[in-house]
Amino acid sequence: MGRIWMLGDNVNTDVIIPGRYNVTTDRTQLARYCLCEVLPEFAQQVRVGDVVIAGHNFGCGSSREHAPAALQACGVQVVIARSFARIFYRNAVNIGLPVLVCEEVVAASADGQDIELDLAIGVIHNVTTGQAFQAEPLNPFVARIVAAGGIIEYIRQEGALR
Amino acid sequence: MGTLTEVIFSHKLGRAVAQGETVVVDVDRVMSHDTTTPLAIQAFRKLTNGGRVFDSQRSHIVFDHIVPAATIAAATLHRDVRAFAQEQDIGILQEGICHQVMPERGYVTPGDIIVGADSHTCTYGALGAFATGMGSTDIGVAYATGRAWFLIPPTINIHMTGRLPSGVYTKDVTFEMVRKVGVDGANYRAIEYTGELVEQMSVSERFTICNMAIEMGGKAGLVAPDATTRAWLRGRIDREYPMLAPSDPHYERVVEIDASELSPLIACPPDVNNVVPVEEVEQVKIDQVFLGTCTNGRLDDLAIAANIMRGKTLHPQTRMVVVPASREVYLEAMRLGYLETFIQAGASVGTPGCGPCIGRHYGVLAPGERALTTMNRNFTGRMGDPTAEIYLGSPATAAATALSGRITDPRNFL
């Protein structure tokens, strides 16, 4: 079980990890400054298994993979949004950070509520309110990458990108 | 048959491909820059375990985001990337912004499929290529395999007509299109630009409109190649290329823009669709003007600004940074006297590259400061302190603002 962190629409990758802090491949460094512009307490208080819930177009802007990597390094279990910007979505899937699209859960959630997920079937359970939600199904190709745990693992299993 | 995107993928795969299909294709070129290459190397090594890139001649690493290195951390990343490039026999290009250098070097031709670890890779669509930004792991995989997977996107047609009124430039047209489409209106979609205005645009202007595709969430922005494209490519490449064009395309949506109705526009912080006529923000005091970037750092952009600034000096409370998009642009701007104009006016002229656009080295903003720039993004904290604000405008508006110290209608200087 994790806690919910709510964010709004159009959260861009500059906000998720500012350019002045992504001159590194060290994921602990990235985690330290994750969302520092909009939620200065986030990096300190986030716990492994917590869930970020956002509005439309999450992860827009720069292609920096440091953004999903920073969220992952913070221990974020999954990001749920009304919609994702394309590059962020690919990057998250590629590195094995689960991302779900679900309109209803965004409207029915609040900061600090408890949440549980069954990622295999896309079921989201808001423990605090007792409500359950079904996320949108994944594109079949994306689902195979997610099942493998990322694109590197997918290619290793398949023997090639195909 | 189909949109230019469908035609390019069909040509590449040798069969009819339609939107909605997921395909894996051999890409023509793979690109990454100094900030995104380190994570791409990690993915590449994980996958290949000491292997080689698919083709060192079609793998390109450009140093542009922090050049010359501003900190020990940046220098260390550069050092590690240089070692990788040497090991893999990849030539590092350090002569400007990746999206300017790749086309200048002749690495982009009509019909190509190109992936780059930078969101503005969509810029290359100006030459009729399908080019899209991806993250480092996708690019590491592409370096290793020469392949990438794509969901063939639906296409939005942005149809541009009319003539640009005096004082209104291609950048203003892009603000109007982002205002109309929204910052995610083209998410997961390709954009094809058509219409008499696009046909009359220089390749540089086409780079500007294709560059801004990502600011609507676009996967790619494309202009079908024509005589203007051919003329620009002459002398840059000597190989044959297919002049692929859309054929009876099905567009999801058509957005009409009549340039003759436009006035100079400003995109106010913190989103690019926060667009207002320049008159509405004319009293906003500006601490720094920045002219440059992959959107507006080319020779014609510098010419527009230099023509306004010739013989004049910056407002005493305003500073200005000018960064030519590439060495080629820099040398030509020097030869034509533009750089001298900027320097005489009191501006700093920087090394070709991304410059202050990403707040990693020179030209950063202090708390509460305001910048007017020719960039593509006005996001919170992008150029420095998160309380600093970024307004976006055309090169002409940037020049007029640098002289007045407040956001200024460039028509006052024409």
Image (cartoon, coloured by chain):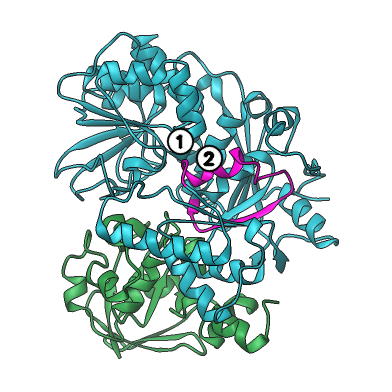
> Which span of residues is magenta-colored?
B94-119
Q: Which chain is green?
A: A
Q: Is disc 1 in contact with disc 2, using a CB cutoff of under 8 Å?
A: yes
Q: Quadrant of the C terminus of chain B?
A: top left
Q: Element type at marker 1?
A: loop
Q: Element type at marker 2?
A: helix
Task: Please tell me whether residue B271 is drawn above or below residue B53 in the rendered image.
Answer: above
Q: Nearer the viewer, residue B354 or A12?
A: B354
Q: Which residue is mark 2?
A: B100
Give the percent coordinates (x, y) of residue B4. Answer: 73, 47
Do marks 1 and 2 share a chain? yes
Residue at coordinates 59% horizontally, 83% vertically from top-left? A154
Among numbered discs 1 and 2, the one appearing first in the sequence: 2
Residue B326 left/right relative to B27: left
Q: Which residue is mark 1?
A: B325
Gap between marks 1 and 2 measured at Cα: 6 Å
Residue at coordinates 42% horizontally, 47% vertically from top-left? B64
